[in-house]
Image (tube, rainbow, N blue to C red):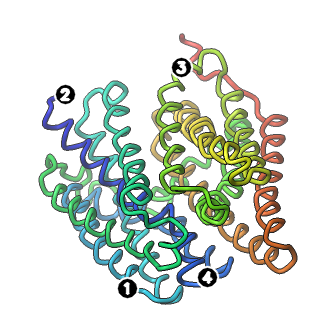
Amino acid sequence: MNLKLRLQLSAMMFLEYFIKGAWFVTLGTYLLKNLQADGLELAQVFSTQSLGAVAAPFFIGFIADRYLNAERVLAVLHLLGACLLTGMYLADSVSSFYPYVLAYFIAYMSSLALANSIAFRHIQDTKRYFPGIRVWGTVGWITAGSAISLVFHWDNAASVDAGALRNTFLLASVCSLLLATLSFLLPKTPPLLRKGDTRFTVAKALGLEALVLLKNRGFLVFFVTAIVICIPMSFYYQNANPYLVHVGLSNPTAKMALGQLSEALCLLAIPFLFAKLGYKRMILVGIAAWTIRYLLFAYGNHPDLAAMLIVAIILHGVCYDFMFVVGQIYTDTIAGAKYRSSAQGLVTVAMYGIGMLLGFWAAGGTSDYLEVHFSDNDYWKFLWITPAAMAFCCLLLFAFFFREQKTATEDRH
């Protein structure tokens, strides 16, 4: 792999994830503090990510795979994204903010899929080189969080009250313009399918052809578990930053970036752990980590038990990689060559489209209920105990019903 291509793809990944990391982590705090959103309004805004995840396969399957070079589509999406982020910066209410964030996530989730597609098309040995390219996305996310906390100080209590977090949208907008420019310089990536070659269908776009795999009991249990665990997972994305700001943890956005650092380390550890643990035990560890991190949030505080909050953040790597990355590998193993793309698409839509959509609304409804019935300290305590209980039920579901099965590929080895 030549150095120029490595630098181009690494820069693409860095900016792709920097853009989202620059505003999404602090979104909940901004909505609550500066736009005076309630729990259900918070859920409405966050659920746009799920709606974008559902819409993206249609956009990619119908346009990018058939008519235009992927790098050009990526450039247009990020030019559009820069405009929409500026609209989010100018919005002065949740109702005026919502159309911009909905349109943005349809564009961004599509760009995320395209960035991966471009990388895979130009890397000959993906197992060897892709992790080293993809890790720059994690570095981008960490850099964004560190800049917000340590360089600009937009997330300290005084700055939040003054409305400084709205500047995160301008930062992301500038980087979106930068990535749009870079996209025109990426290697040419023409569409694989030409008009008339393969008929576009809703079933293909959503991966519904892979529904036949649900006849496999192990995959069915994993599929249901993946949807269910996304419900408590949504509580973290929606409430973690507001909670850390509330308890007065210094540089909360930079500290939340420790979760991405642990994610990168766990990603590197997965190949070595497979031989000892296997799919079931690794996924169980991932689900258990969600339960533990929420209990740490529920009973930790600042400054006396701030270490519990930091541990909860660092557990993100175990939570995410051991459940979702291992799950993607498991899906690929079960699906085989025939259903590989459809199965990954189906699981992605199920998790991010169904599971997280339900999760964001559950988190919003829970927040509004607790705000009415509990005092401030009890509000946060029970807001974290609720997803901890959900994750524990999910743990029991998977532990009792999942049976790990050897595939034909594994049997040959």
Residue beneath disc 1: 90
Q: Where residue 404 sits in the image (x, y, percent)?
A: 71, 27
Upstream in sequence: badge 3 or badge 1: 1
Amino acid on which the number 1 mark rests in the picture: Leu
Q: Where residue 157 sits in the image (x, y, percent)?
A: 55, 69
How far, Cα to Cα, is label 2 from label 4?
48 Å
User: Who is closer to the viewer here, 84 or 400?
Assistant: 84
User: Who is closer to the viewer here, 132 or 127?
Assistant: 132
10 Å crowding of disc 1: few (<14), some (14-19), many (20+): some
Upstream in sequence: badge 3 or badge 2: 2
User: In this rendering, which labeled residue sits more in front, label 3 or label 2?
Assistant: 2
How far, Cα to Cα, is label 3 from label 4?
51 Å
Q: Secondary structure at mark 3?
A: helix
Upstream in sequence: badge 2 or badge 4: 2
Residue beneath disc 4: 37
Q: Where residue 286 sits in the image (x, y, percent)?
A: 67, 37
